[in-house]
Amino acid sequence: MQLKHDLSVYRTTSSQFTQDRRDEQMNSHGPALKIGSNHQPASQLFELFELMSGKLKRSPYAARKILIRNGIHCHFCSRTIYNYVYQSIIGISPHDLIQGPRKKRKKLSVTVSPINHTGAISIEKRPDSINQRKEFGHFEMDCVVGPPGSKCVLLVLTERSTRFQLIFRLRKKTSQCFVQLLNRLERRLGAKRFASIFLSITTDNGCEFADSAAISSSCLSDKPRTVHYVAHPYCASERGINENANRFIRRFFPKGTDFSRVSQTTLNAVALWMNRYPRAIFKGKSAWHMTLPFRLCFTPLFS
């Protein structure tokens, strides 16, 4: 609004006011995109898209660490890549990530009584040294089942401190088959080495882990080969590392996969891929790097 010489008011356009308003709006837009007119960061976005899409979806953090591992200087931090995902700049939406937005599930009241494990030690009695992951050799164990009617399952062992993975195939989901597998592994390693690697094993209340006495007893000596701890019924959070490993395995073997057609060589390759996956908890290092002093101990298991 402006005034004339006779003090009458009229409306007009002010170039200075328009410029000031534009400068104020531009200041609230935040920083410009890092790609800009630089073609090298733009090409890196395409490489990140290749790593984060497809069958083996990597997280933005893991995709960035893989580029650095291959000798490529990445211009983007993990937070920037996540921002590009949520702004649909990189061509991937949050729902395309391997762990996209999760829906809240309603808690169901379960009245089924748990299986009684004779001689099993409750997870409440597990020492703090195991809970704090300060010592190597404490594993979490679980089974990945196949389609209905299939008897063959996968046995997944995850080391708590290094996240090192071992995957084996069981013909049946029974305690007898599971104990036979432990006996076979102990014969390959020897009683002394087996006891030094598998200090303790934490499982759920599944029927395949019901024979706790046979799990702890050695088939080569009179001394116990490990300590068997059992988590509370319907508390998967007490074995969070194991549940996360199962999600990794489902990338290769979706639900409905018949594991009787999967060879142990394929399972070893999947375990190696998981062990080489960059992890933020280790500042970009993988379980393969964290188990360097103990790596030779596992060699007889893959023979």
Image (cartoon, rainbow, N blue to C red):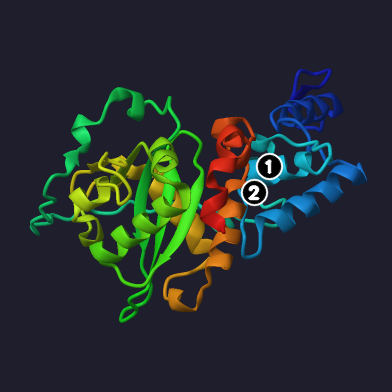
Tags 2 and 1 in contact by the CB under 8 Å rule? yes
Query: Foreground: 138 or 257?
Result: 138
- Is 300 on the left-hand or right-hand side of 141? right
Quarter of the image that includes the N terminus: top right
Secondary structure beneath disc 2?
Answer: helix
Quarter where residue 93 is shown: bottom right
Query: Foreground: 183 or 228?
Result: 183
- Please state the horizontal and vertical placement of residue 172, each as a whole percent of the image: 31, 71
Q: Say above or below: 102 vs 251.
A: above
For the residue carrying disc 1, how many other residues have a C-alpha within 10 Å: few (<14), some (14-19), or many (20+)?
A: many
Q: Residue at x 29, y 58 (%)?
A: 179
Quarter of the image that includes the C terminus: bottom right
Label 2 sits on what residue type? Val
Label 2, label 1: how far apart the Cα atoms are: 6 Å
Which residue, given by chain and number where applicable, does mark 2 sit on?
Answer: 85
Secondary structure beneath disc 1?
Answer: helix
Label 1 sits on what residue type? Ile
Which residue, given by chain and number where applicable, does mark 1 sit on?
Answer: 81
Q: Residue at x 72, y 51 (%)?
A: 89
